[in-house]
Image (cartoon, grey):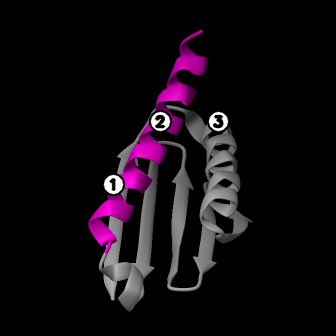
Amino acid sequence: MADIRIHREHRLGLAKARKLAWQWAERVEAEFEMECTVIEGETSDTVEFKRSGANGQLIVAADHFDLEAKLGFLLGAFSQTIAHEIEKNLDALLASGERVKKK
């Protein structure tokens, strides 16, 4: 099994970060056939995601995102490519959130 860990800091606050996390969850459900569940908390949310060969969670806090994923044997061979794609999507989403905040 391959593990992916990604940490991104931001200055969006929890409300805006939640909205972006929902967008991310909708995107991975559509593009990668993930099943996502959002567990809302007082100071952070957890987006759990899974599909055949992969599972993990995205912790959404007021000042950071932490993503951890476990890839099965077949997807593990592509772990670097998958990690890069996740980073690219998450960074683009954060950048769009920062642009909206600055307006």
Dot 3 amino acid type: Lys
Figure quadrant of the C terminus: top right
SS at circle 1: helix
Q: Answer whether residue 95 is magenta in the image.
A: yes
Give the distance between the C-alpha atoms of the residues marked 3 and 2, in whole angstroms: 15 Å
* Above or below for 77 versus 90: below
Q: Earlier in the sequence, mark 3 or mark 2?
A: 3
- Look at 69% across and 58% down and name the residue there: 30
Residue 19 pos. (x, y %): 69, 42
In the image, 41 versus 22, the foreground residue is 22
Figure quadrant of the N terminus: bottom left
> Can you tell which of label 3 and label 2 is closer to the viewer?
2
Callout count: 3
SS at circle 2: helix
Q: Earlier in the sequence, mark 1 or mark 3?
A: 3
Q: Which mark is residue 16?
A: 3
Give the distance between the C-alpha atoms of the residues marked 1 and 2, in whole angstroms: 12 Å
Give the residues drawn in magenta, as a range.
78-103
Q: Could you classify mark 3 by the number of other residues whose Cα lies within 10 Å: few (under 14), some (14-19), or many (20 or more)?
A: some
Q: Which residue appears farthest toward the top when viewing the image?
A: 103
Residue underneath mark 1 = 84
Residue underneath mark 2 = 92
* Above or below for 18 versus 32: above
- Look at 68% across and 39% down and name the residue there: 15
The reply, left or right, for residue 51 in relation to residue 68 is right
Q: Are marks 1 and 2 in contact (CB under 8 Å)?
A: no
In the image, 43 versus 77, the foreground residue is 77
Q: Could you classify mark 1 by the number of other residues whose Cα lies within 10 Å: few (under 14), some (14-19), or many (20 or more)?
A: few
